Amino acid sequence: MSKEKFTLHPISAVINFVKVLKEMIIPLVVVIAVNGFGGGSGSWTSYIIYIIYAVLLIAMLVSGIIEWKRFRYWFEEEELRIEYGLFVKKKRYIPFERIQSLNYTEGIFHRPFGLIKVKVETAGGGATKEADAELTAITKEAAEQIKKEMNLAKHKESTISDGDLQQEELAKEQRKPLFRMSRKDLFILASTSGGVGVFFSGLAVFVSQFSELIPYETIYNEIIMFIRFGALLIALLVFFALLVAWIVSVAITFINYYEFTIWVEDQEIIITRGLLEKKKITIPLSRIQAVRIVENPLRQLTGHATVIVDSAGGSLAEKDEKIRLIPLIKKDKINPILVQIFPNYEFEANFTRVPKRSRKFFYRLDFLWMIPVATCVSYFFFPFGLLSFLLFPLSFLWGAWQHKTAGYWMDEKQLVVQYRLFSRVSIWMEKKRIQAMTARTTYFQKKANVSSIMTTIKSGVSGSSTTIPHIEKADAESLMKWYEPTRIEPIDREKEQPL
């Protein structure tokens, strides 16, 4: 391996500067707004806050340039070695054999120069949900060189030559993707997702930054005056706000999931997506702990679902250990794709449903404490307060809905659990991936002869638990027996028989 040291592209300094600037932009806008957008009384002291911000901006730009100048990476002794640091020089050595994946991102600063950002994920990474190493901006040729060095190191003991690796890369480029999301699917995804709620949440967070400047009393009086003009105008205003939120949600979804494509290469799932910022995410199949099919009620009616996989650690999902493998797909098209990706799974499940006598455990009896609250609300806000009592029949219907959905299925190698909070979730877990299984029986469950089973798998930094609620006690015992490790009898070598 070459010991030549490589640098990042100079645009890295600008990217680092913009990254810090984004965190300071809201406080800066608030300060300007508080000072009346005018600049002060004319004395130089009225501009001191702006002077401080200007100095900070210059310092951030200089620090970004210094970070870029001090960053070096090279290949030595089958390792990716990195040297960096603003004031204190640091070195990091990452053995190629420990690298699980190289994830690529092309942002708006990268594309004009033909650059990409590379995130290096290792087997032991993920404690802080950040990449083990990040090369902010390098050429695509430099990224391919890293991948080539990694492949050569991992195949060192085999007879694969450099020419064989090139032929293998050419074959990968000609390979057809397993799944590509159409624009119609993107539109349905945006229309049936929670993007509208995210839009209003983000708007609320933005408005909260200016809470001290907003004249709430004046706005309240204006609203009261506006209401007098009639409910029609209010309805039109609400409709217009929801329409704008929906349009923004659709636009964000198109930008984030544009040309969403899936490949499987070298025991890795490769996902590419994005319009303004094109991302390429690699998920090693060895780190997949479970497969989930999620159907919210609206998508369930239209025959669509989302496929999510649980990953054991790392920052592959950037902020979550649950990765959207397929954001939206017709339900009848899921199994053929998943069988190609996970040939060890059986995706045809014949669920055993929880018994009818378990239905009472699904009713939200903990809502009973709300009866006095609903009574008070009804008294003080009569007659509209009476609507609060609708929560109780709705909670019972919700419990019955959850009872009807809950169930499980197992074979020799895997366990499948189906349950519902609001969306229907079906989760496939291989027996060897389950970290723990616990049977739990309360006093009331014992009288009804039912039990609950809790399973835990590795997911992210900690773990993810799934409960099979209120099943037959005999079924719970069968599941615990199924999970017990197989005992190997000692062999008498003289008689070749078990002792």
Image: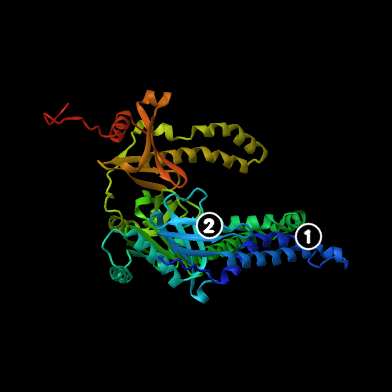
C-alpha span from label 2 to label 1: 44 Å
* Residue furthest out toward the bottom: 112
Q: Quadrant of the N terminus?
A: bottom left
Nearer to the camera, 115 or 326: 115
Picture quadrant of residue 370: top right
| Pointer 1 residue | 34
Residue 14 location (% of width, % of height): 60, 69
Picture quadrant of residue 218: bottom right
Report the side of 106 relative to 1 (left or right): right
**Marks 2 and 1, the one that precedes in the sequence:** 1
Picture quadrant of residue 378: top right
Label ID, residue 3: none
> The residue tagged with tag 2: helix, strand or loop?
strand
Residue 373 location (% of width, % of height): 61, 35
Amino acid carrying mark 1 in the image = Val
| Pointer 2 residue | 91
Q: Residues within 10 Å of mark 2 (few under 14, many from 20)?
A: few
Image vertical order of residue 112 relative to residue 287, above or below: below
Q: Quadrant of the C terminus?
A: top left
Image vertical order of residue 112 relative to residue 103, above or below: below
Residue 177 location (% of width, % of height): 33, 66
> The residue tagged with tag 1: helix, strand or loop?
helix
Residue 408 location (% of width, % of height): 32, 40
Q: Residue at x 34, y 36 (%)?
A: 354
